[in-house]
Amino acid sequence: MCSCGVSSLKQLQREAKLTLVSSTSIIEGGAHDVMVKDAKN
């Protein structure tokens, strides 16, 4: 609810707007240029 900008369930039900996104847009919207280091070293 916090990310929707509402403070109650009733407000969420009144003001909620759903947006469909593709799996590609979720991947593209993630972190970029992140280097993952091996924990074993």
Image (cartoon, grey):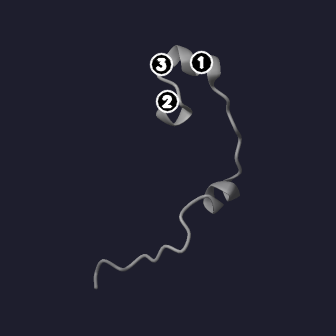
Disc 1 element: helix
Query: Between 36 and 1, which is closer to the camera in this rendering?
Result: 1
Q: What residue is disc 2 on?
A: 1
Q: In the figure, 21 relative to 17: above or below?
A: below
Mark sitting earlier along the chain (3/1):
3
Disc on res. 8: 3
Mark 3 or mark 1, which is nearer to you?
Answer: 3
Residue 36: give x, y in percent of width and height: 42, 76
Q: Amino acid at mark 1?
A: Gln
Residue 19: give x, y in percent of width and height: 70, 38
Which residue appears at 55% of the width and 17% of the height? Answer: 11
Marks 2 and 3 close (CB-CB < 8 Å): yes
Marks 3 and 1 close (CB-CB < 8 Å): no
Which residue appears at 57% of the width and 60% of the height? Answer: 30
Query: Between 12 and 27, which is closer to the camera in this rendering?
Result: 12
Marks 1 and 2 close (CB-CB < 8 Å): no
Number of residue marks: 3
Q: Quadrant of the C terminus?
A: bottom left
Mark sitting earlier along the chain (1/2):
2
Q: Amino acid at mark 3?
A: Ser
Q: What residue is disc 1 on?
A: 13
Q: Mark 1 packing: few (<14 Cα in 10 Å), some, or many (20+)?
A: few
Q: In the figure, 12 relative to 19: above or below?
A: above
